[in-house]
Image: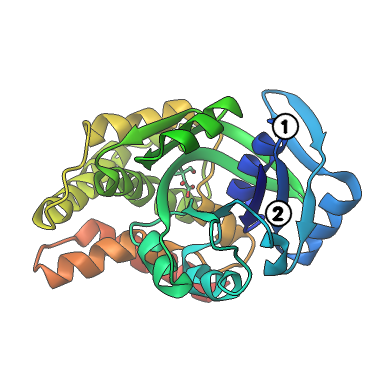
Amino acid sequence: MKIAIMGAGAVGCYYGALLALGGHEVTLIGRPQHVEAMNRDGLRLERAGESVFVPVQASTEAEGALDAELVLVCVKSADTEEAGRALRPVLGADALVLSLQNGVDNAERLQAALGRGVIPVVVYVGTDMAGAGHVRHHGGGRLVLGGHLALAKLFTRAGIPTEISSNVQGALWSKVILNCAYNAISAIAQMPYGRFADFPGAERVLRDVVDECLTVASRLGVTVPGDMHEVVSQLAVLMPEQRSSTAQDLARGRPTEIDYLNGYVVRQGEALSIPVPVNRTLHMLVKMLEKKN
Ligand code: KPL
């Protein structure tokens, strides 16, 4: 299948590599530095101590998605509308568009910018970019999506464990709660998840973040599946070497997605008059560090 991936960051490159290894014709659309490297050498995937160069196409332009049957949008949350506007004139009538992004409302925002339906996909993967066109995997990789059995099969066949959920909104909240718990702390401390547990008080802070988020979600009528305290403590076991995408963005002097993570929960909490002091503090500290950069 012809697949285009908008956003050649760590998430886009990781899934792009697996889909290309699974026999699909993959085009990654991203920044010139990554595009040049991928067109020259292929996309380098490092995982489980092995490194492979995967042949892919790469482009800096949305036109790279021409004729694509499937489009995975993996851009940062702040770039969702721009990606939608760029893709709109390019996509064929039958192209399926998926949002694989952090945050709760990207699929809706993308849908509005594109003028067509978008399937939200929840992504659980620990990755980073080790260099131009070079992605490293640190754990996880599971996707959760609503409905689409054929898509779930396509991903699973490419070695991407995929679950179907009848409660995608709950699944999106479950993921944003993980992000609220880990992203800011990992960014402020520039620390991998496996080291959180050593710090006295960290467990309590994580618990408070989760409780605040769950209160907001529940007042919005969202049922978050599973025991979120357990899910949060398991992430450090699943991805001990991972630093959050927020930590990676800050380290590179880039804007973070924090307004769509803890910042989103703070805005919802304010609108509902629910106190969210821990999320507010984490959000503010990351904004301060962003300004300092
Ligand atoms: O989504 C992530 C992120 O860093 O943004 C997790 C799953 C927390 C992995 O780092």
Per the image, the residue denoted by label 2 is 28
Residue at x-position 42% and y-position 46%: 121
Asked which quadrant contains residue 260, the reply is bottom left
Q: What residue type is labelled 2?
A: Leu
Q: Is residue 240 visible?
A: no
Residue at x-position 66% and y-position 34%: 18
Q: What residue type is labelled 1?
A: Leu
Does ligand 1 reach within 8 Å of label 2's beta carbon?
Answer: no
Question: Which scheme is used to colour this image of the protein?
Answer: rainbow
Sort mark 1 into few (<14), some (14-19) or many (20+) by Cα contacts within 10 Å. Answer: some
Q: Is residue 169 left or right of residue 190?
A: left
Residue at x-position 34% and y-position 51%: 180
**In the image, residue 133 lies at what x, y percent?**
77, 50
Closer to the chain start, of discs 2 and 1, is 1
Inter-mark Cα distance, 2 to 1: 14 Å
Rendered view: 234 above or below 57: above
Q: Can residue 265 be seen in this view?
A: yes
Q: Which of 178 and 275 is in front in this view?
A: 178
**In the image, residue 131 lies at what x, y percent?**
76, 50
Q: What element carries label 2?
A: strand
Q: Which mark is residue 21?
A: 1
**In the image, residue 75 lies at what x, y percent?**
56, 61
Rendered view: 107 above or below 129: below
Q: What element carries label 1?
A: helix
Residue sticking out furthest to the right: 40
